Image (tube, rainbow, N blue to C red):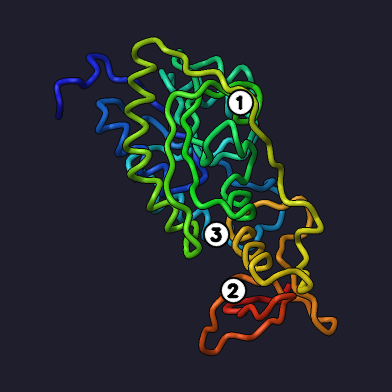
Amino acid sequence: MPDDRPAQPWRIVIVSQVAEVAAGYAHLVRALGHEPVAHVATRRRSPDETPPAGAVAFLNRLLYEGPPDLPLVFPATRRQLTALVRAFDPALVLCTGFPWRIPAEALALPPLGWLNGHPSLLPEYRGPTPMAWAVRNGETEIGLTYHLMDDEFDTGAILAQGSVPLDDADDLMTLNDKFAPLAAELLPIAFDRLARGERGDVQEGGSYQSLFEDDYALVDTALPAGDVHRQVRAWSFAPFALGERGPILVQGGARRRLLRTSLAEVDGAERLDCADGPLWIVESEPA
């Protein structure tokens, strides 16, 4: 390893719902000479709820694709989150893809703070689903920003940021693959600034996007095919919804959720006529 490893490694708690992200962070943290001590996630449901579709697969990914040598901890409440972070006595908490607003008492625990990796070029696209909004708006690049967390969503001071191309064929898996080398480039910058006592660059202006509105859950074939295609892609990047999860196509009283479409004809795909021409339904499910 290079000689610029810290003389005193930081104890770092990793907080993420994404197993691959947590595993990647554990590797990066060690490469930078620090010590990951725990992986914190939430089960995303109340104990008395019926498990939602995909819950078992989600938990299995955390168990078997997350950092294999770290304790995996599931706080049931935000108050428990504070107690658990305190128990691991971290110098820093590294967070990406976690749905809870972090309580102030938890934010105050680590001396270096909470460092969040947000998938946008902050201050633009604050909020819970930045990748989905970037796709919806037809962006051709997508950012990754490391910023210190405060008591609002995605408003803390910025320590490092960069971007990667956003292509029409990208999905969550391919974007994760693109983000991995970018994170490896940006995280050392953020850590170095923290080690030198810097607290980042204050954000000014920007925008906040919440979850998609109810109307966006329904497909309107009176729109151009490109708009409908972007709607289908945008929903594939939106794991949460305020109401019904879209995009829903209603035809003859039957309802389907469109999972994948193409602007070019695909063998075996179903034609859907839109305002300016056809769109091809590659994959759908009952809704």
Q: Amino acid at mark 2?
A: Thr
> Would residue 56 appear left or right of 190 to someone viewing this image?
right
Sequence-first tag of 1 and 3: 3
Mark 2 or 3: in front is 2
Q: Are marks 2 and 3 in contact (CB under 8 Å)?
A: no
Q: Amino acid at mark 1?
A: Thr
> Would residue 233 appear left or right of 3 to someone viewing this image?
right
The label number, if any, that marks residue 237 in the structure image? none
Residue in the image at 69% along x and 46% along y: 46
Q: Quadrant of the C terminus?
A: bottom right
- How crowded pointer 2 is (Cα within 10 Å; few <14, some 14-19, many 20+) is rated as many
Q: Which residue is outermost to the front?
A: 276
Residue in the foreground of this view, choosing between 248 and 12: 248
Q: Which residue is outermost to the top?
A: 197
> Would residue 201 appear left or right of 225 to someone viewing this image?
left
The label number, if any, that marks residue 261 in the structure image? 2
Q: Give the Cα distance between marks 1 and 2.
A: 35 Å
Q: Give the Cα distance between marks 1 and 3.
A: 33 Å
Q: Label 3, on which residue?
A: 56
Q: Label 1, on which residue?
A: 155
Q: Secondary structure at mark 2?
A: strand
Sequence-first tag of 2 and 3: 3
- Residue 251 at x, y = what percent? 80, 81
Q: Give the Cα distance between marks 2 and 3.
A: 27 Å
Sequence-first tag of 1 and 2: 1
Q: Secondary structure at mark 1?
A: loop
Q: Amino acid at mark 3?
A: Val
